[in-house]
Image (cartoon, coloured by chain):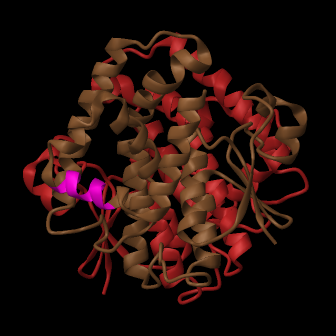
Chain colours: A brown, B red
Amino acid sequence: MTNRLIGYSASYPTLRVIICLKELGLPYELEPPASYQSLKNEDFIANKHPFGKMPVLFDGDFRITESRAICRYLASKYQGKHNDTILIPNDVHKAGLVDQFISYELSYYDPPLSKLVYQEKFAKKFFNKDPDPEVIKQAHEELAKVLDVYEKLLEGKEYLNGEYSLADLVLCPGTNYVYGAGHSDLWDNRPNVKNWWSRLCNRDANKKSFEEIKSFWENN
Amino acid sequence: MTIKLIGKSLSIPTVRVIICLKELGLPYELESPASLQSLKDEDYIANKHPFGKIPVLFDGDFRITESRPICRYLVPKYQGKHNDTILIPNDVHKAGLVDQFISYELSYYDPPISKLIHQEKFSKRLFNKDPDPEVIKQAREEFAKVLDVYEKLLERKEYLNGEYSLADIVHTYYVYGIVTHSDLWDNRPNVKNWWNRLCNRAVIKKSLEETKSFWENNENI
C-alpha cells in the first residue's frame, strides 16, 4: 500500500518527508491541500492535523503528523527493506547521537534558517509582504554563529554522525532554499560545512527533490 | 556504572531527564554547573555541550545532550530492566505516535508556556527585568488555544497515547506556569483529569512537590 503524503512540496517540512521517502526507496502519492487556508478547516483539523499544519502522512490507515516524527517512523519501519540506506543506526548509542543532532537542527539551526526561508521565498509571493532587511540581517548573523559550531562538529567527519543519517537529511530542504537565496557564503566560507553540503547535494534523493522544487518556483 | 547528569534541578529540561531517570528506576548523580555563565566557557563548549546548554548526560564514557534525545536514548536502552515501566512502546506505530506527541509538546505547547514561566519566574530573578503584562496576556491566550486542542486529543483517553508514555512525561514539569494559571487546566475536564493522573504518579508527584516548595521558599530572593 502506497504512502499518502498531504502537503506542498514547496513547504520544506513536507520536502523533508519527501526526501526521506525517496532515500528509503518508498513510493508515495503527494496530495497538496486546496490552499493554506484549508488547513484550518474543521475537517482538516479533525481528520488530518489537530493544529492545522502539514505534512500529514497516511501509511494505509495509520496517520502520523510532524515531519521529523514522520521521518523517524518511516526509517524505523522501512529502512533496509527496499535498499541499503540506513537513516537511524541500530546501535542505541549511535541512534542516540543521531537524535541529538536532529535536536540541534530543531533548536539552533532551524529558527534563524526558517526566518530566512520565509523572508526570502514566501513573504512576497504568498503573503504579499516585502522582505524585512532587519530580520534578514539578524537571522543571517544568528545562522553564521550556528554554522561556526557546525564547522567544529564536522571536524574529521563526512557527516554529522560520521555516516550519513537522518541527522543530515532533516537539514537539507531548508538549507537548499537559503543557500540559493543569496546566503551561500554562510556555507561556502566554512570548509567542513562546505564539503558536507556538497556531499549532501550529490545524493540522488536530494538532487531529484531539489530539481523538482526548482521547477515549481520557475513555473509559479 | 552510575549515570552523571549535568544540569540544574530548577531547569525545565533538566527536570525532564530527572523524571525519566526516576521512572526507569535508574540511579544517577546530578552535577550542577558553577553558574549560568560557566556554560559559555571554552572547556564546557568543547567537552560538554557545543551550544553551551544543559542538560548533558554521561552514561559511562558516552555523552549525549538535548533533553528529549537523552530521554529517547535512556528509554530503549533501559526500559523494563529495573521495573515494568514502558515509556516507548515496542510497536512501531505506537512508538511513532508517542514521537508525534513529543513533537506537539515542542512545537505548540512549549513556546507559550515557556514564555509565561520566563516572564513570571525568571525574568526578574535572573535577568532583572520586570514581567511584561502584554507578553503574558498574549502567551496565555495562545496557550489557551493549545489546551483546547489537547482537550480534544485527550477525549476518551487517560494519557496522550492511550497508555502512559514519554509523551506525557515531557509535558509535566511546567509546574510553575500551571500553579499560576491553573484555571487553564481546571476549565477543561479532559486536560484536568489527565493532569491529576500525572500528578498522582509517585515520581512526578515528588518532583513537582520539590519544585513547588523551592518556589514557595524563594519567592523574594
Residue A72 magenta: no
> A27 or B74: which is nearer to us?
A27
Residue A217, percent from left and from top: 54, 32
Tell me the quarter of the image containing the C terminus of chain B. Answer: top left
Please state if B213 lies on the left or on the right of B177 as rendered: left
* Residue B32 locus on image (x, y percent): 25, 56
- Seen in the image, is B58 located left or right of residue A36? left
User: Range of the magenta residues?
Assistant: A192-199
To which quarter of the image does residue B84 belong? bottom right
Q: Position of residue B74 (x, y in %)?
A: 46, 75
Q: Residue at x 89, y 33 (%)?
A: A42
Figure check: A147 above or below A144: below
**Which x, y percent locates residue B214?**
43, 44
The N terminus of chain B - image quarter? bottom left
Is residue B203 visible from the viewing direction of this image? no
Q: Is residue A138 above or below residue A29?
A: above
- Residue at (49% x, 47% y) in the render: A211
Q: Residue at x 64, y 47 (%)?
A: B104
